[in-house]
Amino acid sequence: MKQDQPKQVSPGCSLAISIAFGGIFALVGAYIVSISLGLLPSNPENFKAPRLVVAAAGMVFFLAGVWVAFQAGLGAWGADTPLAKWVQYILALAMMVAFVSVFLWVGLGSGERQFETSTSIGPVTTTGTASEGEGRCIFGGFGILAGIGVLVYAVRQGAKLLSGGEAPTGQSQQAAGAALGLSNDLEHSGENKKE
């Protein structure tokens, strides 16, 4: 019995879907940023966070949409050019910094916070409130860990791009590790196996 093959989406249709999807995200993000910066009228009482934090959240959506549309527009072959790699790196880095900044503000920023919890097991859902300390610890801890991840990405991917796009090895990998204060254990373990 012959198994049915999944239908392939035509490249033109895939491109249109990706650009439309990215465009929707970019428009939503631009709308949020415009409201938070006062470019569009809004009721100030609706803001539960500083306007710049709301703008950072909007930038996550905007940059994600631009990134998706940019990726789609490049196609399979255009993504390998050095300029495209740098644009992707900058978009991804800016998106990650904006994302992390929201968590850091919730966890470490000044002012009072209110946190709600929700637990679902099957059809039963319970809701409650969490203490400010618990919420700040979770959001702040995640923000710090994600910030470290962004720093590692920035250094390693930057070193990779500066070395010509190949995986960081030798001097560029050592420079990336030195910038983070890390030793290059993988390289040393590989040298021991060769001997």
Image (spheres, helix red, strand yellow):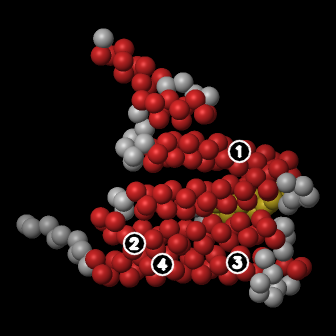
Question: What is the residue that sits farthest to the bottom in this orientation?
Answer: 41
Sooner in the amino-acid sequence: mark 4 or mark 3:
4
Tell me which residue sits at (85%, 47%) in the image: 133
Considering depth in this image, is 141 or 175 the residue closer to the camera?
175
Distance, label 4 to label 3, CA atoms, is 17 Å
Amino acid of disc 4: Phe
Q: Residue furthest top?
A: 195
Where does label 4 land, which residue?
21
Q: Dividing the picture into quarters, in which one does residue 15 lie?
A: bottom left
Question: Can you tell which mark lies on residue 56?
Answer: none
| First-in-chain label (3 vs 1) | 3
- 1 or 2: mark nearer the eye: 2
Q: Position of residue 49 (x, y in %)?
A: 83, 67
Task: Tell me the quadrant of the picture where the C terminus can be found.
Answer: top left
Q: Is residue 69 left or right of residue 39?
A: left
Q: Nearer the viewer, residue 70 or 113?
A: 70
Tell me the CA gap for discs 1 and 2: 32 Å
Q: Secondary structure at mark 3?
A: helix
Whole-number angstrom distance, CA of label 1 to CA of label 4: 31 Å
Distance from disc 3 to disc 2, alpha carbons, whole Å, reads: 24 Å
Pair 2/4: label in front: 2
For label 2, the residue is: 72
Task: Note whether 77 is above or below 135 in the view shown.
Answer: below
Give the residue number, with chain letter if any, for mark 3.
32
| Disc sitting over residue 144 in the figure | 1
Residue type marked 2: Ala
Disc 3 and disc 2 in contact, CB within 8 angstroms: no
Residue 140 location, x and y as percent? 76, 48
Within 10 Å of disc 3 (Cα), the crowding (few <14, some 14-19, many 20+) is many
Residue type marked 3: Ile
User: Which comes before the other along the chain, label 3 or label 2?
Assistant: 3
Q: Give the label, 3 or 2, closer to the camera.
A: 2
